[in-house]
Image (spheres, rainbow, N blue to C red):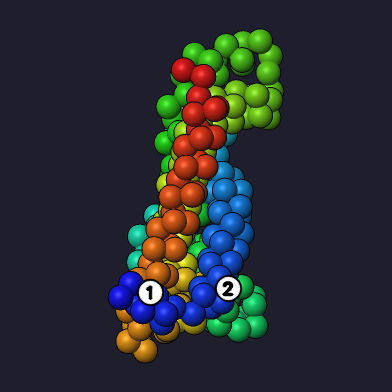
Amino acid sequence: MFKEFLADVKWDMLWDATVETLYMTSISITATFILGLILGLILYLTSKGNMWENSIINGIIATVVNIFRSIPFIILIVLLIPVTRVLVGTILGANAALPTLIIGAAPFYARMVEIALREIDKGVIEASQSMGASNWQIIRKVLLPESMPALVSGITVTSISLISFTAMAGYIGAGGLGYLAYLEGFQRNNSAMMLVATVAILIVVFIFQAIGDFITNKLDKR
């Protein structure tokens, strides 16, 4: 009976969808890490009492981050359709999902970066300043190394959210496992296809979580 159930699974389509999900997730994680790190550093450094204190810049960045962090992803997809069409030339396919994935996840990760930086002992920063370290040296040799375990942990959490985002993006034709589960599974009443695609998404989540936890544990010297 179980074999008969799995007979409805289109394994070639499952493989292609898995590759698309991994592609979207990997590219968006990389871009989110870079953009979120930059935004998080600016938020931290321009806040009150820090090296680049500037209430205007901090207020502008914080407002932009809060706005995009608060918009539900499915609504953000619709709002960014014109932007996606300009950047990619289409609103369908894995590449079309990337702008929305990055814009949706980077602000969330930026806040996690800011929190990680705030947890660094102020005494370490003050000691570096007293030894004549420049601001850039403090960023490269103190802030980033000291916060790296938290930064990796944060991007791991963000990557799990991105995987769920790719599944939602599948509903509007972005491809991937979410698209497969919806089109081949739900719309065509193929329970086996929907179940296997869901299990595949869970496996991808577990893999990313395990990799993130491993790296975090290696970096954490406490």
Residue 77 percent location from the top left of the image: 45, 74
Q: Earlier in the sequence, mark 1 or mark 2?
A: 1
Distance CA(mark 1)–CA(mark 2): 22 Å
Residue 50 percent location from the top left of the image: 51, 29
Residue 151 percent location from the top left of the image: 51, 37
In the rendered image, the residue lying farthest to the bottom is 188
Front-most of 66 and 163?
A: 163
Front-most of 61 and 98?
A: 98
Name the residue carrying label 1. Answer: 3
**Image quadrant assignment for residue 1:** bottom left
Measuring 60% from the left and 23% from the top, which residue is drawn there?
142
The answer to whether the residue labelled 1 contacts the one labelled 2, judged by CB atoms less than 8 Å apart, is: no
Measuring 61% from the left and 73% from the top, which residue is drawn there?
95
14 with respect to 164 (left or right): right
Name the residue carrying label 2. Answer: 16
Vertical position of residue 125 compared to residue 209: above or below? above
Is disc 2 surrounded by few (<14), some (14 to 19) or many (20+) residues within 10 Å? some
Is disc 1 surrounded by few (<14), some (14 to 19) or many (20+) residues within 10 Å? few
* Label drawn at residue 34: none
211 with respect to 167 (left or right): right
Three-letter amino acid code at the position of disc 2: Asp
Residue 186 percent location from the top left of the image: 34, 83
**Image quadrant assignment for residue 89:** bottom right
Vertical position of residue 73 compared to residue 221: above or below? below
Residue depth check, mark 1 versus mark 2: number of the one nearer the observer = 1
Measuring 49% from the left and 80% from the top, which residue is drawn there?
10
Measuring 43% from the left and 62% from the top, which residue is drawn there?
201
* Residue 174 visible in rendering: no
* Residue 180 visible in rendering: yes
Front-most of 190 and 32?
A: 190
Three-letter amino acid code at the position of disc 1: Lys
Instruction: Identify the secondary structure beneath mark 1.
Output: helix
